[in-house]
Amino acid sequence: MASYEQRLIQIRQSLECVQAALVIDPFNQLLIEQEKQNMSDLEKCSTIEERILRKKSRATWIDYGESNSKYFYALLKIRASKNNITSVYNDMGMKITYPKVVENEFTDFFTQLMGKANGLMPCPNTSIIKAVNCLTLQHQQELIMDITHEEIDEAIRDMPKDKAPGVDGRMMPAWSCTAITLIPEVPAPSKVKDYRPIICCTTLYKVVAKILTRRIRRVIEVIIGKSQSVFIEGRSIIDNILFSHELFKGYNRKGQERISQGDPMSPYLFVIAMEYLQREMNQLPDTKANINSVTKMQETFQRFFAASGLQANADKSSMYIAGVHQDIKASLLNLIGYTEGSIPFTYLGVPLSAKKLNIHQCLPLVEKIIEIVSCWSARMLSYSERVQLIKSVLFGMQTYWAQIFILRRKIMKMIEIIYRIFLWTSSSATSRKALIAWDKVCQPKAAGGLNIINMRLWNKAPILKQLWALTNKKDALWIKWTHCYYIKQREVNTMDTPKTAAWVVRKIIEEKKDLLQGSTMQTSLNAALADMEKQGRFPIQRAYVQMQPQFSKFTIFGEKGIPSDSTKADMRQMGYEAGGQHQPGFVKTLFDEMESSSEPSEPSSSSGSAGFWPRPQAFSPP
């Protein structure tokens, strides 16, 4: 960056001298050519500088559009203020402001934390590793085979194009260099321990890691149990959340005494370590809420720490105890050293509760969206950039919740109001200013809208996927649990809602009633579901498109009185309008032809029933 700044200064100075000379001698051909060369060099260096500044702004959600606007410079100021650590409190509570002392405080802290060589670690228990699935000889040979040119090429192509080869932009000197960056863990960090270090890897390290990651990805499913659903292709983290709700449904129930009630390689290495811990835990006898069981669990954690180096942070850990007396609870908490947790709490980014979520528990989602639109840098976005922010960033925040819960209508209404106000006013202040109704904004562009996702309709698509999974995918742990305890060989399409299931599972099964009543979209959805059954996967986006109302746009040239953006509803209204000024006979005939040509064919059903959730054999090939 500094070299480009210096180069820009030199080019501008040279250009000023040349242009000053041209004022005196405007027809000097040598000066004219030199000015052209300086202008070309200035444009090239300015483009590089602009790309560097955009990279520093970290506005990765904007793929197209301006890259040198006020918004990017506002982000630069925000990042500069966040990245500048002016003061910090030491362990004695004294505030340090002198830059060199602040630097030494961080260096000493992380040197003690990261700079120690680990001693000899005990080997993991091989009997536990061999107790369940292990890699076959073929899988082992795939992991240690020679690296091919194709693997290297694929790894390099997979990397972002705007990444530098090394710390200083050159490959060879940067092979053994590593940059450490501090990331704040709390909104207003004041102590050294409020930061966590991350290592910025070099290109060579990334290439090696990506090659090894691809090899591990091909074989890891063989050794990882079904209870682990994160970082494994084909499994979803949502399965863990749904299963956790099922486990916590009886948390508030009173019980009797002594009755007991889951760098590119980092995710895969973590999953392998957790698989070993799970196998260690499976060796324990039935655990209960007593001193003996908790002591054995703690000993297991200590053996896992000795073998892997991974240890739970007591300051961030809690213990949840239900159905025991207060004296036993106090003894258990004193033994393990954790604080007592309470329901509800946040698990994998969403609230985990034994009861149905209320509005208060969903407010963190609303507050997070308000925080983004209230940021002063967001006010500098243009209209098109605000539309893109709503589509990519803001909508993505609530999509994660919508894949798990059926959001309450009041919450969805609150979020839609925030989106609407931000779109038309670029702020979060209450306003009734809206040029177009929000339902119209959510329509496709072909129908005159902005193609912003309809939240209420989108919330049904992920729930439809969960229903599809209950019928067709029976490998996830929460689906096996639901089938074993509640479905019991019955049809999901016809069974009653199990009253004893967790509220999340009940809401998913109850939703089939509303979906079954959607006769207007039933035909197209059946065809889509048949194709999904054939492919063995459920694209939520496609289900959402099939569930949308059909907005058709017709362009008619030479017909007076018929707008070019007329929809089916508009043409139907014009076709039956009295007076004949819109040629009703012609329009009605044209509409009928368009309607018949766009009508999807209804799939046949071997069972004779066109239920919204038929069995796989009831589908005909698309």
Image: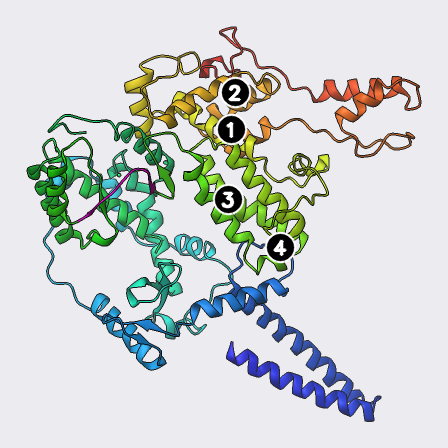
Question: x%, y% of residue 461?
Answer: 51, 29
Q: Which residue is mark 1?
A: 460
Residue position marked by numbered label 4 in the rendering:
64
Q: Which residue is mark 2?
A: 515
Residue to which mark 3 is pinned: 396
Cα–Cα gap, marks 3 and 1: 16 Å
Residues shaded magenta = 338-346
Which numbered disc, 2 or 4, marks the residue that appears first in the sequence? 4
Q: Earlier in the sequence, mark 2 or mark 3?
A: 3
Amino acid type at circle 1 is Lys
Q: Type of residue at label 3? A: Gly
Q: Estimate how packed mark 3 is, as few (under 14), some (14 to 19) or many (20 or more) residues with alpha carbons within 10 Å.
A: few
> Do callouts 2 and 1 mark residues in contact (Cβ within 8 Å)?
yes
Answer with the quarter of the image where residue 194 lies.
bottom left
Image quarter of residue 140: top left
Under circle 2, the secondary element is: helix
